[in-house]
Image (spheres, rainbow, N blue to C red):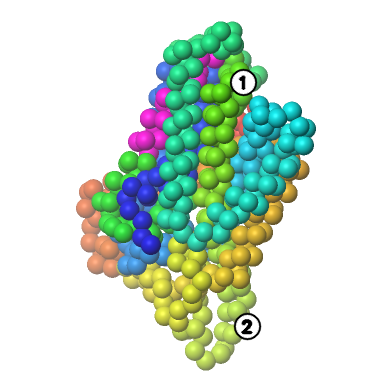
Amino acid sequence: MSSTNKSAVLTLLHTCCGSGILALPFAFKANGLILSVLTIFFSGFCALSGLLCQAEITKYVRNKRNLSFFAVSKITYPSLGVFFDMAIAVKCFGVSVSYLIVAGDLLPQIFQTFTSNSFFHHRELHILTLSIFVIGPLCFLRKLGSLKIASMVAISSVVYLCFMVVLNFLFPSADVKALKGTVSLWKPSLHFQDTNSLKSFPIFVFAYTCHHNTFSVINELQNNTLKSIRTIAISAMGLACILYTAIGISGYLTFGDNIKGNIITMYPSSILTTIGRIAIVVLVTLAFPLQCHPCRASIHHIYEHFASSNLDKNSQHAAGTATSRNYLPAGEHNPLIATVSPTPTDELIEEGSSKVTTSELNSKTFTLITCSILCASLLLAISVKSLATMLSIVGATGSTSIAFILPGLFAHNLIGSEYRQTRTKLPTWTKVKKNLALGLSFWGVCVMVTALSSTLFF
């Protein structure tokens, strides 16, 4: 079933509004109020630029129902496709684990409100139960469009969190007032040992990352015209910016420089706070499948890359090799449907390039990869309680690659490609778009170096 523009916006908004939203007020501590608000807007603009680059790429694709980072890389930078998917897989897997850790930390606090039985206070029990009975079944849904209702519930959780943070700012209790520290309007916080501007910047960047699911959303759109895709991108980033600004400003003004990394843990126990914690658990639970979906596709791409390489080596002298080999791995949409077609299903065509086809992700492979992701995430989340440093590195590398570097490189390569064969001079606006796309990639590299350096050395 194809998805509408509304469900597409919800999916992208749900993807970017994950556990990172809890740390946004903490990021304000390093920059001061005014600079942090400007950073939110600037980060949103950069993220939107990446989405618009992905939209621009669709102009150079004949069949817009089987798009993926891997497929696009095959007509732009074929030798680097497997590395692109490795970055996507690592990023999505790391974020998935963080969701389970957040749920494991909050669920015991929630149950302590209702029962004193110590059996329900073990995080391992809650992570295991949640993975088996809720997250697992959701991860086996084959299309992102199937998560429409889940996305609506998750976005409602974000809205409630925003409501709770704003309400506590406008009408703080005596306990909340007692926790308030100094509020810095312009100057950064003096608590340099806790955080700094360079180290907090990836939090703003990571908050908008939904680009790994953008191609899947485009694949499932009823109306996947360029205008429609642009509208979806602008709507999703605009709504995210509004939510982030409201939560960031209200949370920071409530606690000032005493703000902690997870704002939901700052509020005293109450009915409002308990509902807020439940909302966060719902949010991260329903966001897990949105990370599993591209992670599964990327793992399949990596496997197919090496399998195809070995297959080509063993059969390069066989008759008919040219027409029966060189299948591209499945994309992020149709490959999740367990049907195999002898006819080509992917027709990514660049001017002057040859047609390429796609292999399907069958039910057995789909189940095996999904179970592997779930089991690995479960074991890691149970055994490790804090992944802050690892996730900072994953966010600095994976998020910047997916949001800035890859869309910029792909768009720079494809924009204006229709003028190559005729050797016609590029129109001015086309040349500007190519340069802007390349600039976005360079910006991504700068963010990656800065974020990694601040994480490793500060």
Q: Is residue 39 left or right of residue 395?
A: left
Asked where in the image residue 413 lies, by quadrant, the reply is: bottom left
Question: Residue, x 55% and y 40% (percent of image)?
Answer: 282
Residue extent of the magenta highlight:
237-255
Question: Residue, x 45% and y 66% (percent of image)?
Answer: 334
Q: Is residue 238 magenta?
A: yes
User: Can you give x and y, in whole percent of width and height, for residue 140 in the image?
Assistant: 56, 59
Q: Earlier in the sequence, mark 1 or mark 2?
A: 1
Q: Amino acid at mark 1?
A: Ser
Residue 359 higher or lower than 268, as above or below: below
Q: Is residue 186 left or right of residue 116?
A: left
User: Can you give x and y, in whole percent of width and height, for residue 127 in the image?
Assistant: 68, 43
Q: Amino acid at mark 2?
A: Asn
Asked which secondary structure carries label 2, the reply is: helix
Residue 131 higher or lower than 329, as above or below: above
Reading the image, the residue beneath label 1 is 269
Question: Residue, x 47% and y 34% (percent of image)?
Answer: 158
Q: Is residue 439 visible?
A: no
Contact between marks 1 and 2 (CB within 8 A): the answer is no
Disc marking residue 314: 2
Asked which secondary structure carries label 1, the reply is: loop
